[in-house]
Structure formats: C-alpha cells, structure tokens
Image (cartoon, rainbow, N blue to C red):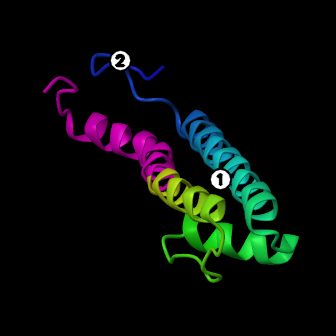
C-alpha cells in the first residue's frame, strides 16, 4: 500500500488524499463502535438513546461510563465494551499516525525493516 524507501514519496496532493482516506476509516470505525455501544446500552441497561450515546462516547474517549450498569448483562456488556473501546483507541491512533510516520521515515531515509 505504501511506497518503499527506494521509491519517491507521494506528491503532496496524493499524500493529503491518503491522509483523508485514513481519517475516513478512523471516523467509520468510531461511528460503528459508537453505534455498537449505544445498541448495547439500550438493550442491556434500558438507557435512553441520548444516555446510551453519552456512555458509549465516554468509554470510547477513555473517560469511563457516566451511568454505572445495574444489571448483570449490562455489567458484562460494559466491561467487554470498555476493553473493546481501548482497542479502538489504539487502532484509531494507528490509522491516523501511520501515513504521517511513514512520510517521516521516507523524509529521513529510515529503513522500514527493523
């Protein structure tokens, strides 16, 4: 997907397109994850859609839930969703920083093989 160190870096316009593509993937991942969290909170905890949005967004943002779960199913869902949200945070950061770091490696002629 990326050019090797022996190839010229992408022109600026193509690099911006690559960044936009990665940003779109990250936004899609976050939107899907937010929807999963909202459906889970509505189904297991019977929260309103607005409260489910708030809890899901807070977990995805790393802050923690606003409404502590009360049912066993809700507690299990919240725990699993919190673990999932941590992985989504890492994946989103990787999606956003990978093209930038690759461009920097190209700029400084670093080897891509470790």
Q: Residue at x 73, y 56 (%)?
A: 40
Q: Position of residue 81 (x, y in %)?
A: 56, 56
19 w.r.t. 47: above or below: above
Q: Position of residue 35 (x, y in %)?
A: 76, 54
Q: Quadrant of the C terminus?
A: top left
Number of the label disc, if any, that sits on residue 103: none
Q: Is residue 76 left or right of residue 32?
A: left
Question: Residue beneath label 2, please?
Answer: 7
Q: Residue at x 64, y 41 (%)?
A: 25
Instruction: Indicate yes or no whether the magenta region holds residue 89.
Output: yes
Question: Residue beneath label 1, please?
Answer: 30
60 w.r.t. 83: above or below: below
Q: Is residue 96 left or right of residue 101?
A: right
Q: Residue at x 45, y 53 (%)?
A: 93
**Distance CA(mark 2)–CA(mark 1):** 33 Å
Q: Which residue is more in the foreground, 33 or 82? A: 82
Query: Marks 2 and 1: which is nearer the front?
Result: 1
Q: Helix, strand or loop at disc 1?
A: helix
Residue farthest along the front direction in this orientation = 72
Q: Residue at x 82, y 69 (%)?
A: 46
Majority secondary structure in the magenta region:
helix
Q: Which residue is more in the foreground, 60 or 76? A: 76
Q: Which residue is more in the foreground, 112 or 44? A: 44
Instruction: Indicate yes or no whether the magenta region holds residue 23.
Output: no
Residue farthest along the bottom direction in this orientation = 66
Q: Tell me which segment is drawn in magenta.
A: 87-114
User: To which quarter of the image does residue 77 belong?
Assistant: bottom right
Q: Helix, strand or loop at disc 2?
A: loop
10 w.r.t. 24: above or below: above
For the residue carrying disc 1, how many other residues have a C-alpha within 10 Å: few (<14), some (14-19), or many (20+)?
Answer: some
Q: Which residue is more in the foreground, 106 or 23? A: 23
């Amino acid at each position: 997907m990326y050019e090797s160190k022996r190839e010229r870096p992408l022109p600026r316009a193509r690099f911006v397109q690559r960044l936009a593509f990665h940003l779109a993937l990250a936004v899609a991942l976050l939107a899907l994850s937010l929807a999963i969290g909202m459906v889970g909170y509505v189904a297991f905890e019977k929260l309103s859609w607005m409260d489910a949005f708030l809890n899901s967004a807070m977990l995805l943002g790393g802050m923690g839930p606003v409404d502590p779960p009360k049912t066993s199913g809700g507690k299990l869902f919240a725990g699993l969703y919190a673990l999932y949200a941590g992985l989504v945070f890492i994946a989103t950061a990787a999606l956003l920083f990978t093209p930038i770091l690759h461009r920097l490696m190209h700029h400084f002629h670093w080897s891509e093989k470790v």
